[in-house]
Amino acid sequence: MDRLRMRTTLLIPLLVLSFGWTVVSLLIIRTIVRQQIYSGLASDLRHSVNTYQNLQQQRRELLFRESALLADLPTLKALMTAPDARTIEDAGTEFWQVSGSDFFALLDPGGKLVATYNRGPAMARPAVEKQLQEFLQRPEQTLLLSSQGRLYEVSIQPLIFGTHGSGTPLGYVAVGYAIDESMAREVSEAAAAEVAFSSGGRIIASTLPLQLQQGLASQAGQLLQPSADDKNIQLGKEHYLAASVPLTGERGSPQSASQLIVLKSIDHAMLLLMRVNQWVAALGILAFLVGAVLIISISRTITYPLAALVGGARALGQGNFDYQLSEDGAEEVRELSRAFERMRVELQRTQQKLLDSERLATIGRMASSISHDLRHYLSAMYANSEFMSDAKIQQSEREDLLLEIQSAVHGMTDLLDSLLLFTRTGRALHPEYESMALMIQRAVSMVRSHPAARDVKITLNGLSSLEAWIDAKKLGRAIYNLLLNGCQAAKRGNGSAMVTLVLDEDQSFIRISITDSGPGISETVRQTMFLPFVSEGKESGVGLGLTLTQQIAQEHGGYIVTGKSDEGHTLFTIVLPKSELHAPDRVALNKTPERAEQMI
């Protein structure tokens, strides 16, 4: 089979196996499913209805006992003797809250509603009073109360001073729970079916999607007919087997009665109710054995070479150019392996050329930038030194020339420090338990001595006693770079040159924000300003300041973001997560914060 085409190797056995055994299996499964699905659904539907009736009976008994306990409370009886209905209504709130029920009402001995409480919007008192008075004439333990599209199951107990046989009636207490969406979900979980509560031809609560509830409401009356215990209905595009049960022994037509409707999805059952019998088991075993033999045969000719080819592609994607491919398998696989091998060799050669050219280009850019800046500084120092040697030059001019020489020295020092720090980025940090304020003040002092900060007002806000495990030398250099850039930008602005540094913290982060009054950053510069050897808007500079600042923030587990302040000024923020600022060995090098503070 090694010389067969891949199409021939795959199609012939797969077509025979798939077509033959699939047809036989589907015919058998289809026959079994059609015989079992409706009987199983009907059985599940009856079980779901019985489950709800058991739950309803338990809830009714609990509701009856709860109302009986409330009716025996001496404090509630004493409240009903109050002559003022407003007093009863105000004090009754406490009993309602204690009961934890969704509906609570107090009636006088004549059945007149004194106070009513319910969760949600207030109910219409006349309608509630009328229904409660009707309930007083019925012997049932619990009854249904409907108002404004809401449904409550209510239990009413008399309040009697003395014994029930000879005591003085004080009124009635009514307690109920809402039949709502939460109850629908509870019944649905217990019955493992979709459920809906309807009353007066309206759906009160349901687990069905909203678009299906309207269609169900139009069929609710038919579902309550005695001859329609199990009914096949369609809601939207799905078919259901439905059954209904009255919530209580209410009077009235089926269309106006309250009922529970339980629905089992026939379509869903057709997908899930796959009952496997002995025929399916035998076919499965036989198909497994035949498939195993076929898979072994296919693996020897196709799967193994393809797996090796996939491994080569994965290795190439990870940059491994030394992975060797085998040339086993079908003709197409071997041809593909050879083509892949040629591509691997060519990619390796091309990548090496790109690396060499990129390395040379980087060295060239760095050498050109450094050479230009060093020549600039040296030329300034040389020229100013010659001017100072002139005996005719005045003292004030000598001082100006000296300042220019100092500026050139500072520039060369910054350039060399940036280059040295750039070569060390990526190495391990050397954190110490350092005061953030002291570290910032040292960086500010260095900036203020720089000629670029002359005539620039530097303001510090939010400095506190905050301490953290940081590499103070590196982080101080990052702040120095941002402050120096801010001073240089502020001098290019139209107004007074100002730079503001703000230190703040919250539970998770430490933020160091630096704002300058400069002209802002253009969109083109913003896209490349963190790349090395990029320097825009400066007469000199190697272009490593922002690159180093970003790398130092990342080495501390943080990052740097740019934006605008409330005044519209350029804003750079170093964000340091507190969770990343820890001692080198994560136990603070056996130094408590107090000892570390003494060492600093």
Image (cartoon, rainbow, N blue to C red):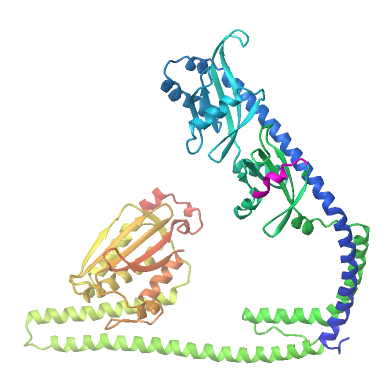
- Magenta portion: prevailing SS class: helix
Determine whether 449 is above or below 590 in the image.
below
Residue 320, by quadrant, is bottom right
Please report the residue visible at 29 percent of the width from the left and 55 percent of the height from the top: 462
Residue 600 visible to the viewer: no
- Which residue is located at x 79 percent, y 46 percent? 44
Return the residue found at the far front. Answer: 253
Q: Is residue 410 visible?
A: yes
Q: Nearer the viewer, residue 379 or 206?
A: 206
Q: Residue furthest top?
A: 166
User: In the displayed structure, does residue 332 sit left or right of residue 544?
Assistant: right
On the rendered image, what quadrant is the N terminus found in?
bottom right
Judge whether residue 65 is colored magenta. Answer: no
Q: Which residues are magenta?
A: 218-226
- Residue 174 point in image, percent of width and height: 56, 25
Residue 543 image-quadrant placement: bottom left
Residue occupying the point 69% across, 34% down: 56
- Percent from the top left, x then y, of residue 130? 54, 28
Nearer the observer, 575 or 70: 70
Q: Quadrant of residue 445?
A: bottom left
Relative horizontal placement of residue 178, taking residue 522 as reference (left or right):
right
